[in-house]
Image (cartoon, coloured by chain):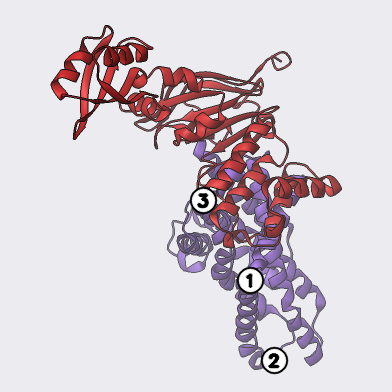
Amino acid sequence: MSSTNNHFMLEVKNLNKKFGEVHAVRNLNFQIKKGEIFGFLGPNGAGKSTTMRMITCYIPPSSGSIQVDGHDTLTEGLSVRKKIGYLPENNPLYNDMKVQEYLSFVGEIRGIKGSSLKKRIDELFAICGLNKMAQRQIGKLSKGYRQRVGLAQAMMHNPDLLILDEPMSGLDPNQIIEIRHLIKSLGQEKTVIYCSHILSEVSATCNRILIINEGQIVATGTPDELTSRSSKGNRYLTRIKGDRADIEGKLSSIPGVSGVQVVNVASEWVTAEVIATQDDIGEAIFRCVVDNGLSLAELKRESASLEDVFTQLTRG
Amino acid sequence: MSSILTIFKKEFKSFFISPIAYVFITVYLVITGFLFFQSFFLINQADMRGYFSLLPWVFLFFVPAITMRSWAEEKKVKTLELLLSWPVSDFQVVFGKFLAAFGFLSIAILLSVTIPITISILGSPDPGPIIGGYMGALLMGAAYLSIGLWVSSYTENQIVAFILGVVVTFVFFFIGSPFVTMVAPSWLVPIMNYIGLGNHFESIERGVIDSRDILYYLSITGFFLFLNVQSLGSRKWE
């Protein structure tokens, strides 16, 4: 009923999942807008796959609700599953089938028939680079090709919501770039949920990221927003010629600097890390060095990566 | 309906992908043929009673071998999660798999037509009981299959599925045999006689097809398919 003017593709409300004593997912709340590429991050065992299983109606939530384009997973499971394309974790496939045979089977189950099925499979072969593999047995394919078959399966019916659980595992760097482009182009009109524990991947592809740990949301935002959260954001790496104690003292006296750590001393060159409480202190460091008549070989702002954010957030 | 057909086609084909299917059918035909003809010439009667009386025993081992893979493999390779993320109901998947196994068993059973042909050359058998016997064998096979399929849904190990299948069908077979009913409390005997998988085949063996026996096999099949749907759904209970 609410599906007509609902601009959320996915709405998760107070989602909980308990397996006996284990509380796998705790009170998850988030929405995904249509057309977003949404990164779902967390270390192994954080509850990512459990959440995906609940979204795809494989298991029901212990409490809370999930709506996919306005359809509830508990009461309208069939409509929900029609909207979703799913690549599960570890990409399970029917190993004894041939690639083309398998995709025909998936298409038929999705209600695509005859010439339109043939056309769609040809399209998917082209998109996923599977042309040469059509008559190969799936069990004998390399991991990269298996992954492509899994992707083709998930995209079969051109789903409104594409859920990819660790889609890049087993792919080589070239393939990763290909698939990344594919996901980005899909994300222009479709909604994609991208589960991973590899952050560089997610930050390169996603508009918005949610990080969970031990079943709880620990952070959510755009990749930039998350990066700026890190305490490593205001660190500068410097290499200055001179006496170690002298340099330490001078750098510490700059307003806004909270600490100086000498990393390395090689002949006369001192490499030090300057930790600042405020942003944009680079110029002040440069002035300080020049005013004191010292030589500067390097001055670099250390940009925090999502890896740092991730590590900080998931280690508590 | 079309989903059931799609699943049926896929499952049915998958039986014939590996050579095991052909080995299976060959072994089935050789063993049943051998056991039958061993006594056929001694009894010297042109009928297939002796053949059909073997089937409840032979099925005990052959049918779980057909069904052991059905769910165990899906669970082991984790394709079950994928399969159930497609727009199909649990029932459609169960029934599609059942039909495929039934199709396979039917082929094995019907390939034994060489036996009635041989008998017709040697003598002049009454076709009625033979046709009835085949129908009965298919019905009984369906009941065995539904049990094997259900059992397979509890494990991801094919061997375990096979052994459990043999044990469970054997219990249902044994329960109605005179060996057990002799020592059972008398009020239980009629129930056990009714439940026993083999008892309903005795009249079929003789060539008498009773609607009660048909109903029995159909309801056993339906009951275990129902249990199968429930056991698939049990992932949702935790």
Asked if B92 appears above or below A206 in the picture, the reply is: below
The quadrant in which residue B8 appears is bottom right
Kind of residue at badge 3: Lys
Q: Earlier in the sequence, mark 1 or mark 3?
A: 1
How far apart marks 3 and 2 lie (CA) works out to 50 Å
Q: Where's residue A184, x and y in %?
A: 63, 32
Query: Could you say which chain is coloured red in the image?
Result: A
Q: Specify the label residue B167 is tagged with.
A: none
Q: Secondary structure at mark 2?
A: loop
Are there few (<14), some (14-19), or many (20+) residues within 10 Å of tag 3? some
Q: Where's residue A97, x and y in %?
A: 65, 59
The quadrant in which residue A77 appears is top right
The number of discs equals 3
Q: Are marks 1 and 3 on the same chain?
A: yes
> Seen in the image, is B224 located left or right of residue A45?
right
Question: Which quadrant of the rendered structure holds the C terminus of chain B?
Answer: top left
Q: Tell me which chain the residue with mark 1 is part of.
A: B
Question: Which quadrant of the rendered structure holds the N terminus of chain B?
Answer: top right
Q: Can residue B80 be seen?
A: no
Contact, CB < 8 Å: mark 1 with mark 3?
Answer: no
Asked if B36 appears above or below B222 in the picture, the reply is: below
> Seen in the image, is A143 located left or right of residue B5?
left
Residue wearing tag 2: B44
Residue wearing tag 1: B21
* Numbered disc in front, either 3 or 2: 3
Residue wearing tag 3: B75
Colour chain B is painted in: purple
Kind of residue at badge 1: Ala
Q: Where's residue A257, x and y in %?
A: 26, 12
Q: Earlier in the sequence, mark 3 or mark 2?
A: 2
